[in-house]
Image (cartoon, coloured by chain):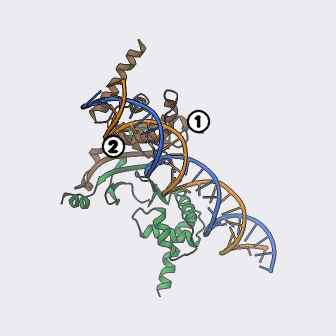
Chain colours: A green, B brown, C orange, D blue
Amino acid sequence: MKEVVNMVIIDSFAQKLLDRNIIPSHQRVLILKYLVENQCHPTVDQIFSALRGEVPTLSKATVYNTLNVFIEAKLVRPLSIEDNETRYDIVTVDHGHFKCSICGGIVNFAVDIDRFVAADLQGFRITAKNVYFNGICPACHTQTEK
Amino acid sequence: MKEVVNMVIIDSFAQKLLDRNIIPSHQRVLILKYLVENQCHPTVDQIFSALRGEVPTLSKATVYNTLNVFIEAKLVRPLSIEDNETRYDIVTVDHGHFKCSICGGIVNFAVDIDRFVAADLQGFRITAKNVYFNGICPACHTQTEK
DNA sequence: TCATCATCTTGTAATGATTACAAAGTCACA
DNA sequence: TGTGACTTTGTAATCATTACAAGATGATGA
């Protein structure tokens, strides 16, 4: 039974790729599935390590290629929040990203970006908006006070 | 006369460094001066190439070191606007950065960041805020329409 | 004037993320 | 079963940044 359920789920991922004219190869479906189920803004390395068990022949180059295909299709967006490693986020609603400098965790927060910008950017065609905050999250903050 | 004027100007930069407990070496003063006079969000390479004429022995490592000292002292802030090279900005008022994907230029724009975020980030200590937009600037836009 | 000490600068080597590339694999279609 | 288009894979190359050790600088004190 588990297999059937899995097939159905995977098919929905495959469909998502077909909708964007991306051939749903095994690897691509798995990577998309991973991104949807792990919305923790993973790095290439995290994705690679996590899926290696399922697909032992997986290559890091494939992860890079696939993510770039997804970015091109606007399925995911890259985050460069003052980090040497790019992180990847399944695009949903516009939101900001906070990175804790101690634990390294990344937290989403709501931002109504369109409301407060506009005047200055008449005539600009905007294709991506990113709001990055850095600092210390509550958990690490109480930790360091001890 | 030019020399004297220069000395006075340089001294004001040196003072700025002393105020932050940074020893105002020749190289550091020059790099600070360059950043103040060229607020175009330069890369390490641009700074290095520009100052090489004045200080032929200048090393790229020094530029990196100095910029990191400045960042530590909050004199400048690094920009990572989906670029593989970090850019450096003399911190003034809070503002957003727009990068044109065609000409590569970076434009500042006004943003009242504090107004529209807050609720979600209770208990977070925020040390840096960045708003990055990507797209096509008006000049490149009219260019491509031809 | 000279020695000392701390700090800065410099060149080079190392690191590490990302991309380039060519060979091998996969899959649909005739 | 063969062909062709497209993917995957491993490795080599690229490039920004950092690490490190040796040399330069500059202030201080005898």
**Residue A45 appears in view:** yes
The crowding category of the residue bearing disc 2, from other C-alpha atoms within 10 Å (few below 14, some 14 to 19, many at least 20), is few
Q: Amino acid at mark 2?
A: Glu
Q: Where is residue B74 drawn, in percent x and y?
A: 32, 40
In which quadrant of the rendered view does residue B69 lie? Answer: top left
Q: Where is residue B77 drawn, in percent x and y?
A: 37, 41
Task: Give the residue at the far bottom of this rendering.
Answer: A1
**Are the residues tagged 2 and 1 within 8 Å (C-beta)?**
no
**Residue at (41% x, 45% y) in the render:** B132
**Residue at (58% x, 36% y) in the render:** B143
Reading the image, the residue beneath label 2 is B72
Q: Where is residue A128 drawn, in percent x and y?
A: 46, 49
Q: Where is residue B50 drawn, in percent x and y?
A: 50, 31
Reading the image, the residue beneath label 1 is B143
Q: Are marks 2 and 1 on the same chain?
A: yes
Q: Secondary structure at mark 1?
A: helix
**Residue at (29% x, 32% y) in the render:** B18
Q: Secondary structure at mark 2?
A: helix
Instruction: Looking at the picture, tell me which residue is in the foreground, B26 or C25.
Output: B26
